[in-house]
Amino acid sequence: MPVRFPNLLPNFAPREDTWPTDPAVVTRRLDNAVELAVLCSGFPLAKPKRRPVINFRSEDRKLPKGRRLVPASHFFEFTGSKSPKQKWRFTKTDEYWFCFSGLWRPMPDDGEAFTLLTTEPGPDVAPIQPPKGRFATARKPESELVRALSAGGLTVEQVRS
């Protein structure tokens, strides 16, 4: 598919972190092309004082529209109950970058936002961020698209203790 840029050619600066409501680069299919776009991170909730939805469980859901990919070089998980929490960086073992699966949608204020799709933690993530509750079996093709990496697919590094 051809790649389409909505405005100018991209000049995306590297970022260490992306927090809820931060802009981030995503790819999405529009018509017969792939578009690179900068969207707001997290679906806002109707209640204004609630944090946006940045992770959306993919298990047992059909997701026919709004799929997208978010390129990244790493992601973080946090452990502990007191601030500052322990911070763990996960990188792909054999590749410099990868993509998260996610969803995007238009927002009422004429903007657009995205959220990341999550699944049961894989063997490299589970010791740091164990599964929360029961996980249902996802329907196809989502189960083939959104899945954890095999053991050893991620390198784990504690960056803050």
Image (cartoon, helix red, strand yellow):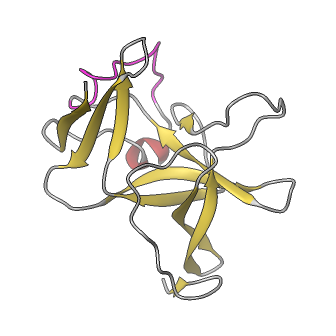
- Say left or right for 2 vs 129: right
Position of 17 compared to 150: left or right? right
Count numbered badges in the picture.
Answer: 0
Q: Nearer the viewer, residue 139 or 112?
A: 112
Relative vertical location of residue 145 with respect to residue 152 in this rendering, above or below: below
Range of the magenta residues? 124-137
| Whether residue 123 can be seen here | yes
Q: Looking at the picture, how far across and down is residue 108, in whole percent?
A: 87, 53
In terms of depth relative to the viewer, which is nearer, 82 or 117?
Answer: 82
Relative image position of residue 115 (x, y in whole percent): 59, 46
Residue 126: x percent and y percent? 28, 23
Asked where in the image residue 15 lies, by quadrant, the reply is bottom left
Magenta residues, dominant SS class: loop
Membership of 51 in magenta stretch: no
Measuring 86% from the left and 56% from the top, which residue is drawn there? 109
Seen as rendered, the residue at the extreme right is 108
Displayed quadrant of residue 40:
bottom right
Q: Looking at the image, which residue is at 52% across and 65% down?
A: 25
Left or right: 159 in relation to 5: left
Seen at 72% across and 59% down, the residue is: 112
Left or right relative to 47: residue 23: left
Residue 55 position in % (x across, y down):
54, 37
Q: Is residue 64 visible?
A: no
Residue at 43% in and 49% down? 17
